[in-house]
Image (cartoon, rainbow, N blue to C red):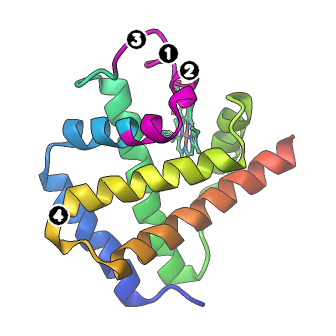
Amino acid sequence: MGFSEQQEQLVKESWEIMKEDDISTLSFYFFSQVLEIAPAAKGLFSFLKDTDEIPQNNPKLKSHALKVFKMTCESAIQLREKGEVVVSGSTLKYLGSVHLQKGIVGPHFEVVKEGLLRTVEKGVGEKWCEDMKGAWSEAYDQLAAAIQAEMNKEA
Ligand code: HEM
Ligand code: ISQ
């Protein structure tokens, strides 16, 4: 099934709402959800592995969380426009090799997906609905599949 214009709008609209919130708080929440589901993931991130607690206002943590959100939004737009996720070749290659090097495997992608969805839910508040969840899920899944395909190519 294709990605509809309404789905693209839902992703864009929720990101607009979230951007108005405090990005530090959302980023912190994103990481806390991921680590709540998979505590061992803490050791994977350079800016977390030597800390006892997740830092509340760490620029690296913030920029990493932002990248995942922005790339998922971008993925939604492309799904709508082109029917597939197109990340520039070099970017995708780079993302593939970063994640391969860190030892990321399939189940990790499910954990991050759950963390992402919980964060959007918290970020948009009462606007949250099943269709919004479906749109973010689809956009993320396609992006994650593109990264994993690149990882498999390289492995
Ligand atoms: C790094 C995006 C999934 C763990 C990165 C970077 C980006 C990114 C943009 C930064 C690369 C750089 O600038 O050096 C994404 C996207 C994902 C995804 C878009 C899914 C669609 C995952 C998953 C995990 C993961 C499932 C597993 C928990 C990491 C780690 C790093 C990283 C450990 C390196 C962080 C560091 O600097 O220490 N990812 N990622 N990523 N990602 Fe992901
Ligand atoms: C995966 N890759 C990069 C950044 C991230 C931020 C939060 C959760 C997972 C991530």
The residue sitting at 51% across, 18% down in the picture is 46
Q: CA distance from mark 1 to mark 2?
A: 4 Å
User: Mark 1, residues whose alpha carbon is within 10 Å: few (<14), some, or many (≥20)?
Assistant: some
* Residue annotated with mark 1: 49
Q: CA distance from mark 2 to mark 4?
A: 31 Å
Q: Position of residue 58 (x, y in %)?
A: 29, 22
User: Mark 4, residues whose alpha carbon is within 10 Å: few (<14), some, or many (≥20)?
Assistant: few
* Residue annotated with mark 2: 43
Q: CA distance from mark 2 to mark 3?
A: 10 Å
* Residue placed most toward the observer, 18 or 95: 18
Dividing the picture into quadrants, the one containing residue 61 is: top left
**Rendered-image quadrant of the N terminus:** bottom right
The amino acid type, in three-letter code, at marker 4 is: Gly
The amino acid type, in three-letter code, at marker 2 is: Gly
Q: Is residue 38 magenta?
A: yes
Q: Is residue 87 left or right of residue 11?
A: right
Q: CA distance from mark 3 to mark 1?
A: 6 Å
The amino acid type, in three-letter code, at marker 1 is: Lys
The residue sitting at 66% across, 33% down in the picture is 98
The amino acid type, in three-letter code, at marker 3 is: Thr
Q: Are marks 1 and 2 in contact (CB under 8 Å)?
A: yes
Residue 92 shows in the view: yes
* Residue annotated with mark 4: 125
Which stretch appears magenta? Answer: 33-53
Q: Are marks 3 and 1 in contact (CB under 8 Å)?
A: yes
